[in-house]
Amino acid sequence: MATAVREGARTPGESTRALAASISRGDLEAATSCFAKDACLLTPDSTVVRGREEIRPILHQMIVAGSKIEVQESSIVLAGEVALGSERWVMSSAGSEGEPFTRALTPTMVLRQVEGVWKLAVAIPWGRR
């Protein structure tokens, strides 16, 4: 079930599922649109990437690697127009040598409503170390 964020994620959960689905189907525009313009993403090496346009190349790398994300569990805590999402993902992609690679991830995401649409404000897709 793909969720189109361009139409507007009405709940934080719709937004996180839309990100996973967009990456899995290779839709860079939809994946990028899941993020607020001033969002931050923390990479696996703990580099902070700031801004939707700077996050876009990271998403592109995931798509080029053929990443497929299965959301196995999702927990959202809502506080007004801000939400904290904790999920469990299984991500499969091509490894550095092109071999299949699958790993379990525990992403943490902060979301906020932007003009009535839920967007990712802070994303730690690979989980905290």
Image (cartoon, grey):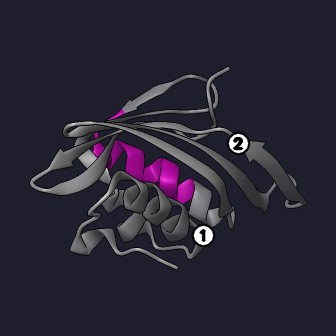
In this view, 121 is above or below 69: above
In this view, 107 is above or below 35: above
Q: In the rendered view, does 57 fall on the left or right side of 100?
A: left
Q: Position of residue 95 (x, y in %)?
A: 82, 53
Q: Residue at x 28, y 50 (%)?
A: 119
How many numbered tags mark residues here? 2
Q: Which residue is mark 1?
A: 24
Q: Earlier in the sequence, mark 2 or mark 1?
A: 1
Q: In the rendered view, does 113 fall on the left or right side of 76?
A: left
In this view, 52 is above or below 24: above
Q: Position of residue 101 (x, y in %)?
A: 85, 55
Q: Nearer the viewer, residue 118 or 53?
A: 118
Q: Secondary structure at mark 1?
A: helix
Extreme residue in the left direction = 115
Q: Which residue is mark 2?
A: 105
Q: Nearer the viewer, mark 2 or mark 1?
A: 2
What amino acid type should be assigned to the residue bearing mark 1? Ser
Magenta part of the chain: 50-61
Q: Residue at x 64, y 51 (%)?
A: 73
Residue 50 is tagged as: none
